[in-house]
Image (tube, helix red, strand yellow):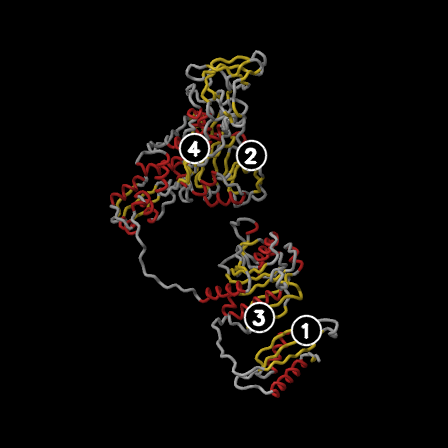
Amino acid sequence: MRIAYNWLKEYIELELPAEELADRLTLAGIEVEAVERPAAAPAKVVVGEIITLEEHPQNRRLLVATVNAGGGAHRQVVCGARNIAAGKKVPLALPGAVLPGRGLLEALEIEGVLSEGMLCSGEELGLEIGSPEGVLLLDPAALPGAALGEALELDDRILILDLTPNRADCLGLLGAAYEVAALTGAAVKHPPAVPRESSRDAAALLRVNVQEPALCSRYTARVIEDITVGESPLWLQLRLLKSGMRPINNVVDITNYVMWEYGQPLHAFDFNLTRGGEIIVRRGRPGEVLVTLDGNERALAEEVLVIADTAGAVALGGVMGGESTEINPSTRAVLLEAALFDPVSTRRTAGRYNIPSEASKRFERGVNPDWVAEASGRAALLFSELAGGKVLRGLLDSNPAPSRPRRVSVRPHRINEVLGVEIPRDEVRTILKRLGFSTGEEGRRLAVTIPLRRNDISLEEDLIEEVARLYGYDKIPATLPRGELLESREELPERLQGLSRETLIACGFNEIITYSFISPRALRTLQLPEEDRRLQAISLHNRLSEEQSIMRTTLLPGLLKTMQDNFYHREMDQLLFEIGAVYLPRRLPLAELPREKVRLSLGATGQLPSPNWHTASQPAGFFVVKGAVEALLRRLGIAEAEYVPVERPFLHPARGAAVVIAGEEAGFLGELRPQVAEIWDYPQPAAVAELDLELLLEKARPVPHVAPLPRFPAGLRDIAVVAPRSLSAAEAQRSIYEAGGGLVEKVLLFDLYEGAQIPGDGRSLAFTVTYRHPDRTLTESEISAAHSRIEEALAKLGAVLRR
């Protein structure tokens, strides 16, 4: 919020310098981010008064003006503008002035006539005021010879307020004036706001029909006729510029000016372009379209509040007007709107169409119901004074449930307990009175009536904060907090999650955190069948964008998107994992909270390690992900895991497996199906996994099992078999353990061979078998007998001993 200091002084008497006021406001909780100066006028530019004006003797398109430059000095100036006349006050740039984009100005002859300066437009002075085709016309009261900066009140200060969302009352100069009054004790003066009305009734021309009082609790309208649209007076343009707004025309500028005064947004419709003599506040209709003032066509919906006439929508309520009723140079009658729109509805509409505005910002935070009619009257008065308008009699006001001031009780002793300082009861009442609050006695409590402009006050704690602000935070002594220090320990699930993170990081993986909101399109890339529960995702009503419009039912879309982004940044070697929640509705539409499950996802692609001169690289694919899962399960003490071939629509048909623990499926892992990788624009294969982390933690036995070092030596034997492809290495290992009769300590697959030397549809599997007895040294005959049983067991599975 930008506050021009000289403008603020119209509403409250101030003796403080702007910088000191900024410090006091900041100490009171209204942060002043900066104090700025307006753009300075160029040096050697003064107020000039045109004394005479004659046609140039050599060029009829030019004029020769005699200008009073102050101090009795007259200057002859050649000018081509046609909006000047004798007696007008204008900016006069004297020789030696440096103008933006023109450089040094010198006296020179123009077609035989000496020109001793230049009459300037606002654009030539670097100011966005006035018409670029004509000379800037100054206030008739300006003194010839005065510096232009003085005449334009450019020697001012702009206070930039960094307001918190709850302080909507300071989004207007009057609200800020009340805050200053609480600090200084000065009285606030409201500007004149009662227009002179004509004898013609507005109600004879217009009706107001509010069909949605829940979304528009109050709607007022005035009609002003005989308007002349043109430039605003210079003083008004300058104030708008200092506030960060661009002047447009007197009608639009007046609505912006009053909004800056009261914090109450207004909108002006061209009354003659509205149809049916009725304003209707209703919801949008399916198929209805509105072209807004920015020229964009907006498809309306039932959730959107619109202002309409009998033929259709003419504005988005509280956000932006429509092009069909826009103020234009031929406008002769204005319908002036001042209303109270629902904050949530306004925020949703502004977000839906991505058109935030100064008006929507104020409605979203809440405006003062007390000032709606007053702001309308103020604008109507300015229309009559600055645009020649005639205000029709009567304010059309739909206000079925007038707002009432809120009453909040506060305990003075509670204030002292919270703040840690003794503030007498009478001083508390004085502070509240300075804030404009009225107080009454309720036993040990104070009953405080809150003015409607302060919609942020609703609790006793709010009043305690107000007392602290005005009392002075700097007067509250600093004390160290006291209390019992309690030991805090993570619950077991949190500790196990931390252990899982540490294990995966030790495996070389990097943790990622993605949004819980995903795109339906990203979920569809997994090519899941329609009956898959993961497609039954929860849709968001107040979505940020289509890319974040549903709650995730799987971690894969976020993982795949992160890998895609890394590929686009030429990061080809990736080991990633994420621990996060998925949201599974019991049924749709939602009737109860969804199930929230913690899952673990992993992704690997590229080379491991990255190519270097010392170590050969291996593809970071299926077996890297499987190895990380195995390392995690070992660290969690889960020994009974199996990897069962499985097909998933997003996994390679021959390179996918389900992870089964004690008969329960805990997740899957596999290489991404090439068609899915192509959809994501992957330049190389990638492997992924997703596990039910809650199930893993339930099965976890993280306490390490300690065993003594073996006292007796081991016996090692290798065995190589040609086995059918249908026989998995894991199944062969189980058979070896079972046939070994308790003497087999470890089985290691050290070779897998497939080639021309292997007959039929088979492959060679080679294992190293470690034999050991805990209490004695095994004899060669015992080892040989066990080895023979193993060969027989493998033969029953179709595996032929390879000689």
Q: Nearer the viewer, mark 2 or mark 1?
A: 1
The picture quadrant where one finds residue 764 is bottom right
Q: Amino acid at mark 2?
A: Glu
Decide if residue 719 is in sight here.
Answer: yes
Mark 2 or 4, nearer chain start: 4
Label 1 residue SS: loop
Mark 2 or 1, nearer chain start: 2
Q: CA distance from mark 2 to mark 1?
A: 72 Å
Q: CA distance from mark 4 to mark 1?
A: 83 Å
Which residue extends farthest top? 57
Tell me the residue that label 4 is attached to: 37
Tell me the residue that label 3 is attached to: 660
Q: Amino acid at mark 3?
A: Val
Q: CA distance from mark 4 to mark 3?
A: 71 Å
| Dots 3, 1 in contact, CB < 8 A | no
Tell me the residue that label 1 is attached to: 726
Label at residue 323 = 2
Foreground: 377 or 601?
A: 601
Q: CA distance from mark 3 to mark 2?
A: 64 Å
Q: CA distance from mark 2 to mark 4?
A: 36 Å
